[in-house]
Amino acid sequence: MKFSLKNFILTVLAHSAYLSGLALIIPLSIIIVFSKFVVAGSVLKLLTTAVLLICAGAAMMYFATRSESRTLRSLGITTLIPALLSVLLMFVNQQLVFATISFYVRDFQKVEPFIQRYLEQRVPHSLFLTVGYLIVGIILIYLSKRK
């Protein structure tokens, strides 16, 4: 495929929209933990925005590649990025993360109990999200080989 600036820009926008949509799914678990502080209807808005970004990214990728196979492969690889980052972050020590955050955030000790609560309640659920991203990414790559 010949290089085209238009396709390059469209591909960058597609990946950005798609990854942003995937990334917006993650805060849903935070919102559920702190649901008493959340404005009514924000979960639906966040989910709708995430789905729209994912669909827009997929559509833009198809317009850039004009190939179902290349689109599925590209989206599969892109889906694996947050999954692999999540797997890597599982091996990072919680105390190291807290020490790093406390270095940059003044009065971190005030929010530390909330973060601790989030980690205790949501990390097992985010593990499901990570596995989901891995499965979806692998399925998309597999389907790209069949087209």
Image (cartoon, rainbow, N blue to C red):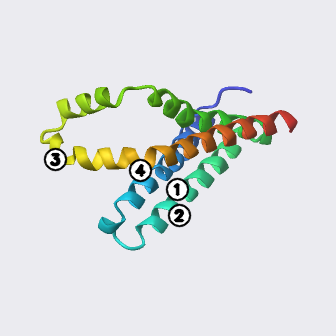
Residue identifier under label 1: 50
* Local secondary structure at mark 1: helix
Proximity of marks 4 and 3: CB atoms separated by less than 8 Å: no
The amino acid type, in three-letter code, at marker 4 is Gln
The amino acid type, in three-letter code, at marker 3 is Lys
In the image: residue 115, left or right of residue 45 = left
Q: Nearer the viewer, residue 59 or 73?
A: 73
Task: Measure how far apart labels 1 and 3 are at the Cα level.
Answer: 30 Å
Residue 29 image-quadrant placement:
bottom left
Proximity of marks 3 and 2: CB atoms separated by less than 8 Å: no
Tell me the mark number nearer the camera, choosing from 4 and 1.
4
Residue identifier under label 2: 48
Q: Earlier in the sequence, mark 2 or mark 4?
A: 2
Task: Measure how far apart labels 1 and 2 are at the Cα level.
Answer: 5 Å
Proximity of marks 1 and 2: CB atoms separated by less than 8 Å: yes
User: Farthest residue in the bottom direction?
Assistant: 40
Residue 80: percent from left, percent from top: 61, 34
Residue identifier under label 4: 121
Q: Nearer the viewer, residue 21 or 100?
A: 100
The amino acid type, in three-letter code, at marker 2 is Thr
Task: Measure how far apart labels 4 and 3 are at the Cα level.
Answer: 19 Å
* Local secondary structure at mark 4: helix
Task: Measure how far apart labels 3 and 2 are at the Cα level.
Answer: 32 Å
